[in-house]
Amino acid sequence: MIQLFHVTKTYGHDLIALQEVSFRVERSEFVFLTGRSGAGKTTLLKLLFGAESATRGQILFDGKNITRPKRHEIAALRQRIGVVFQDFRLIDRLTAVENIALAVRVQGLGKKEARAKAEEMLAWVGLRHKADAYPPALSGGEKQRMAIARALVVEPVLLLADEPTGNLDPEMSLEILELFERINVRGTTVLLATHAYDLIQARAHRVLRLEKGRLEPGLPEN
């Protein structure tokens, strides 16, 4: 599903965020992307959903070249890719169900149908009873579940998550990880970026590790 060939991303003349990164992620696979802060995880995810363009190399998504996508190609790409951020990026003035429905409303779905899909996703992540709550009234774990529901409502084939447990305690982090695993069992490919090595070691999923912008084998020594 995802193929990277010698991908390099630079900012200006001297800041190298990614250097000669090559890997492949198969359809329906669950993969951890790890590395210390500043290793290049977020930059790599941005390249995959079109927020940034690679400086050199090639990125393929389902066989299509997305290395330097045009604006209309980015819109089409984001209809197939869901993204979950560490800081949630919810709209505080909208209720939970309105936040989630907005993701499909912008794709042209009618108000009634969008709300029905949003309620279905809220139920799936265990938050149906919070449909009319506003984000400030929710806990960190509830906000992240809400953000996951928003990413899922577009029915993505690929789900990207950038440090989705970074603001959560260990128990809630494990619950969120299990939710991502349930999503993966449904057939969605998952690429989850995290620096929480204990979370990674609790599972048997494949691991890609970045170190100063380069892909390195294994996990670092403690």
Image (tube, rainbow, N blue to C red):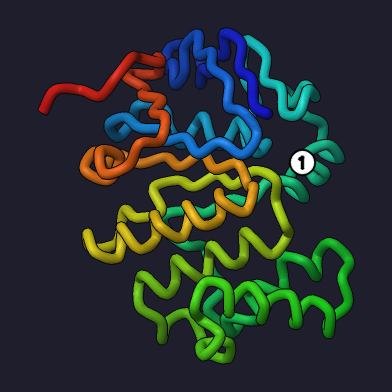
Q: Is residue 70 left or right of residue 92?
A: right
Closer-to-camera residue (91/205): 205
Residue 41, picture quadrant: top left
Residue 80: x %, y % from top left: 74, 46
Q: Eyeballing the image, is 145 above or below 177? A: below
Task: Describe the element under mark 1 as helix, strand or loop.
Answer: helix
Say which residue appears at 75% left-offset and 82% top-offset.
115
Say which residue appears at 30% left-offset and 65% top-offset.
172
Q: In this figure, what is the number of numbered marks?
A: 1
Q: Quadrant of the C terminus?
A: top left
Residue sitting at the far left: 222
Say which residue appears at 56% left-offset and 55% top-offset.
183
Residue 23: x %, y % from top left: 54, 17
Q: Is residue 198 left or right of residue 93?
A: left
Residue 72, picture quadrant: top right
Residue 136: x %, y % from top left: 42, 82
| Residue highlighted by disc 1 | 77
Q: Eyeballing the image, is 35 above or below 99? A: above
Say which residue appears at 64% left-offset and 47% top-offset.
187
Closer-to-camera residue (154/42): 154
Residue 16: x %, y % from top left: 44, 16
Q: In which quarter of the image is the N terminus?
A: top right
